[in-house]
Every structure is written in C-alpha cells, then in structure tokens.
Amino acid sequence: MFDGPALEMLLRASCLKKGKYAPELRSFALTLHFYSKKAYVYVRKVFKTCLPHTSTVKKWYQVVDGSPGFTKEALEVLKCKAVEASQRQTNCVLLSYYR
C-alpha cells in the first residue's frame, strides 16, 4: 500500500521509527525544501515533525561538493535524459565559464 518516503513519514508520524532518515526520505526532504521552504515547514507541521528540522536539511546541503567542474550527478542526469529522448533528436550544450 505505502512504500518509500510515504511509509517512512507515516512511521515517524506515529512514533514507530526514529534515528537516521532513509535515503528516499532524505531526497524528498531536500527536494521539497529546495523548491519551497514554506511548503517544507507546512508538511513538517502537518505530519508531526516526521521530516527533519530545517537546520538538519541545511547541514545536508553543506556536504554537497560545489567546486568548479561537472558533477557526477549532473552527468548522470544528462545520461538519463539522453536515454529517454533516444527516439527523437536531442541537443545538449555543456558550457564552462572561467574568469
């Protein structure tokens, strides 16, 4: 019936689970917080703090490698987009900017 982030949120809301967050829930929390901080706070409030505090999410952001260059994650996304679009022509431009 429920799986992934939805199941973990329900277990945490009912106090049946504590401790580290599963990768799926962590990814959901980061994505929601990225798109809307207000929505994140609302979901956290409605589901009785089953999502981590915003200070925890901010700490998770600090481990993202922000050094210049192409990240492995960005290249993986481009690869997935190319596979999805293999039936039609796709254009992609990679730019590098140096001062």
Image: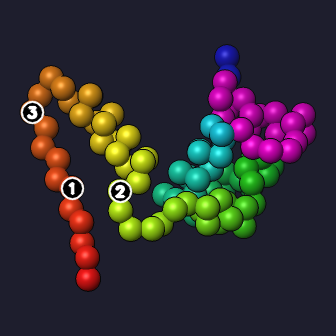
Q: Is residue 39 magenta?
A: no
Residue at 74% x, 34% y: name it: 8
Residue 26 image offset from top left, x and y in percent = 65, 46
- Assign the N terminus to one quadrant of the image: top right
Residue highlighted by disc 1: 94
Residue highlighted by disc 2: 70
What residue range appears in magenta?
A: 3-22
- Check disc 3 and give the amino acid type: Gln
Residue highlighted by disc 3: 89
Residue 52 image offset from top left, x and y in percent = 74, 54
Looking at marks 1 and 3 on the same chain, the residue that comes earlier in the sequence is marked by 3
Picture mark count: 3
Q: Is residue 18 magenta?
A: yes
Residue at 68% x, 65% y: name it: 59
- Check disc 1 and give the amino acid type: Leu
For residue 38, say whether it is visible: no
Labels 3, 2: front one: 2
Q: Are marks 1 and 2 in contact (CB under 8 Å)?
A: yes
For the residues labelled 1 and 2, the Cα–Cα distance comes to 9 Å
- Assign the C terminus to one quadrant of the image: bottom left
- What is the secondary structure assignment of the residue under circle 3? loop
* Above/below status of 28 relative to 53: above
